[in-house]
Image: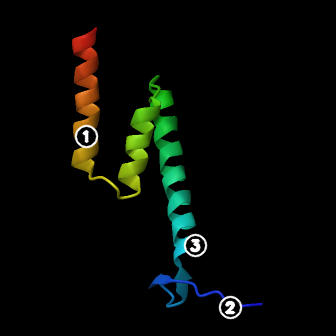
Amino acid sequence: MPKVKVKVKRRSSSGVKVPIMAQEFKLQGRVNKALASVHASMAVEGLQPDKITIALGRQFLEGKISGQEAIARIKARYLAGIRND
């Protein structure tokens, strides 16, 4: 059986090499947990986020867009909705 090289992006706090795939799974777990918490808080307040807002939140939590970018996109969508009503 051939050996498979695993790219190592960084080391864990204990100094153990952590494969990139494991890091991505860990990040996705934290992102999913954060999104579930936000969704629960909004549900208590009687709010229901749409799919686009959830996607923006996921992009922000994954570090793909900045907080300012997420806020700007949400505001633009909100203002476009007000103008169309």
Please indicate, yes or no, whether residue 53 appears anywhere in the rendered image: yes
Q: Residue drawn 35% across and 51% down?
A: 60
Left or right for 25, reference 51: right
The quarter of the picture where the N terminus appears is: bottom right
Q: CA distance from mark 3 to mark 1?
A: 30 Å
In this view of the protein, which residue sits in the foreground, 12 or 60?
Answer: 60
Residue 79 percent coordinates (x, y): 22, 22
Residue 33 percent coordinates (x, y): 54, 51
Question: Mark 1–mark 2 contact, CB under 8 Å?
Answer: no
Q: What residue would you read off at disc 3?
A: 22
Residue 2 percent coordinates (x, y): 72, 91
Label 1 environment density (alpha carbons within 10 Å; few <14, some 14–19, many ≥20): some
Left or right for 61, reference 77: right
Q: What residue would you read off at disc 1?
A: 71
Please indicate, yes or no, whether residue 12 appears anywhere in the rendered image: no
Dot 2 amino acid type: Lys
> Judging from the image, what secondary structure is the residue with disc 3 in?
helix
Q: Residue drawn 25% across and 15% down?
A: 82
The tag on residue 3 is 2
Residue 46 percent coordinates (x, y): 47, 22
Dot 3 amino acid type: Ala
- Viewer-side label of 1, 2: 2
